[in-house]
Image (spheres, helix red, strand yellow):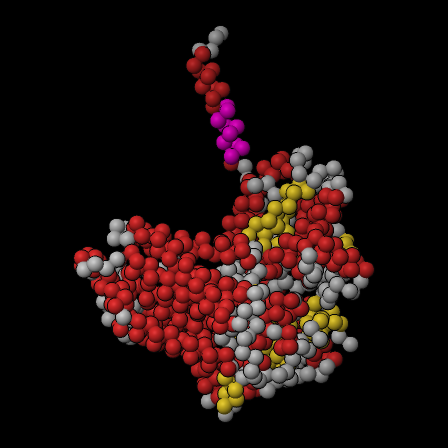
Amino acid sequence: MQVFFQTLIGGLSLGAVYALVAMGFSLVYRTMGLVNFAHGDVVMIGAYVASTFYMSAKLPFALAIVAAIVVTGLIGVIIERVLRPLENKDFDLMLIGTIGFGIVLEAVATLIWGATGRAVPSPVPAAPLDIFGIRVRTYNLVVLAIAALAMVALVLFLQRTKRGAAMQAVAMDYEAATAVGIHVGRSNALSFSIGAGLAALGGGLVGPLLYVNASMGGSLGIKGFAAAILGGFGSIPGAILGGLAIGVLDSFSAGHFQGYSDLVTFLVFTVIIMVRPTGVFGERTVNRA
Amino acid sequence: MHTPRHIRGALIGAAVLTTILATACSAPGKSSTSSSGSGKGPIKIAVVDAQSGQLSSLGHWESNGAKLAVDQWNAKGGINGRKIQLDVFDDQGDPTVGTNLARKIASDGYIAMIGTSESAVTQAMAPILQQEQIPNITSGQADSMVKLGSPFLFLNGPTSTTYDETLAKYVVDTKGIKSIAMITNNGGYGKGEHDAFLASLSKRGVTPLTDQVVTTDQKDFSAALTTIRQKNPQLVFIGSEEVEAGLIVKQARDLGITVPFAGSAPQGTPVFAETAGAANVENTIVSSPYLGNDISDASRTFAAAYKAAYGDDAELHGAKAYDGTSIVLTALKTSNVATGKKLADAIRATKYNGLLGSFAFDSTGVGIFATSIGVISNGKLAAAS
């Protein structure tokens, strides 16, 4: 029983990070119909920038993450600006463009921070809580809370604000949106930069949990992408649910299948997707891809 | 009799073509003999190591160690008046990239290879290097590499069996600890550690309380560590590379596992200590052939030169690569810059007194058969009392 709950807690903690990554994927997909394959590497840049401000500039951890969100938000704007001429002309090229950006970001990170990576000390030094023999790291509770807050804020933004609704309109019908006076490019740029900001939030938070290096975006990106698909690609609550589900699934399969855990995780994932191709919260508002 | 002009032209053309074809068809490894083996230019040696990815710190230390050795030889005038040219290639810690690089260094005329620091990559490269007759001295330690039986593969340190036999002897025989849990990864290195330590334990009639296997890119170890905590061991054996081992120890402490960990080379590195957190690695037992820079006069000289060259403190992997490179350079000197099989034989015959101890290679390519036991106390690795 203790193993069960401890595994659950461990899975939820990493799952919260996957959820933040998945939200970025979903947002860009929901508003542009595009899968941003550079997203995992934006997470990595976010982790590096946050850790640099936190460790070298000695900023408080929260401020360091805000700084990272600003920096990666700018990167998001740049990616969108470069890809903009392709919007509604060649979608495949845009996809490949995002892959290219991912490779560039990884190379830039290696140039700036070197290839060796760094360990980030935990900003919450308190000892883990002990609840009936189950140990819960205080820092993980912080991560879970931030992921929940980010989800609520994002859903409110998309449903309650004019800009959010405009982003939705662009995704559903590009020409009609233009006709009613929505600046499509600006809307996409905003979605890209919010997506990148979410990536930085995830990356900054995951730094003290893991080890920051230039290739960390790979596995975080894949797990986050899988989480977005599982929850229903494009759905924000789905991304949260998918992230937590992938985290927990990963944790339990690691416990039961040991060396074969990756295989089992993605087998289960494949079966779920075969049974329910649109994911748990599948709404499929977007059909441009 | 006159041969018509066009026929003569065709004959010459055919002759030229045959020569070109013959050159093009000869094995790339053989052409290196003429380009750098007995030639006049620099002696080309390749360093293949992960310069990016999670294992890049290993590759970074190793290429530093190799460069230091080569720079010192070049400063003394090289070998037979020829400079040594050392080029670094990035294998990303990936066996597929490694096999591509093996072909590349063969066709580019490198006569020896230093690296890699990953057993799995070395293992993937070994058949190609054997075919191309390029001697390779690796920092890997998995016994599976030795089992390949390539006469061109050498180790610059002991194998996992030596590391873990020494460790088991200290833990079980000297300290009398018999309740031991194991956690290893399923990569080339982790698997080697798992098998070697398990063999050493069963030789002593000890069965591990639990034997947990994780994947190489796993991030959450709650399930494995909670199982270990429930078994309440006196010691946890860890068989995983620097970063992952650091994460495991960090999470173990958070989960309330307070007993010491024990492992080999990776657990003596600064990356392991930083990832886990300095306080969490106290009392870790490390089996290593190079416990620190203060062990001997040779190690002090090496550490000073390393610090001067790179501004960093030297550690085991740099020292291993320094030893390995020095052995290759010594063999090149004694064999008058031989290549291929002759160079491999010269390396095997080299007796070398290095930072790790006295190297004397046996037929399997292993040159050193002893490690020492160290314990991390106050953040420093020191010889066990």
Residue A21 occupies which quadrant of the picture? bottom left
Give residue A62's position: percent from left, percent from top: 49, 72
Residue A217 occupies which quadrant of the picture? bottom left
Give residue A254's position: percent from left, percent from top: 46, 76
Q: Using the image, determine if residue B229 lies above or below residue A32.
A: below
Q: Using the image, determine if residue A198 lies above or below residue A104.
A: below
Give residue A175's position: percent from left, percent from top: 19, 56
Judging depth in this view, the residue of B337 and A202 nearest the camera is A202
Q: Using the image, determine if residue B366 lies above or below residue A153.
A: above
Look at the image and tell me whether residue B358 can be seen. no
Residue at x 55% of width, y 49% of height: B102
Judging depth in this view, the residue of A230 and B115 nearest the camera is A230
Residue at x 26% of width, y 50% of height: A89
Residue B321 part of the magenta-drawn span: no
Left or right for A151, reference A255: left
Which residue is the extreme one toward the top? B1
Where, quadrant-wise, is the C terminus of chain B in this rendering?
bottom right
Look at the image and tell me whether residue A176 can be seen. yes
Which residue is the extreme one toward the right? B297
Give residue B317's position: percent from left, percent from top: 66, 60
Left or right for A141, reference B302: left
Judging depth in this view, the residue of A218 and A38 nearest the camera is A38
Left or right for A161, reference B342: left
Residue A166 occupies which quadrant of the picture? bottom left
Residue at x 50% of width, y 23% of height: B15
Residue B20 part of the magenta-drawn span: yes
Residue at x 51% of width, y 34% of height: B24
Q: Main secondary structure of the magenta part?
A: helix
Span colored in magenta: B15-24
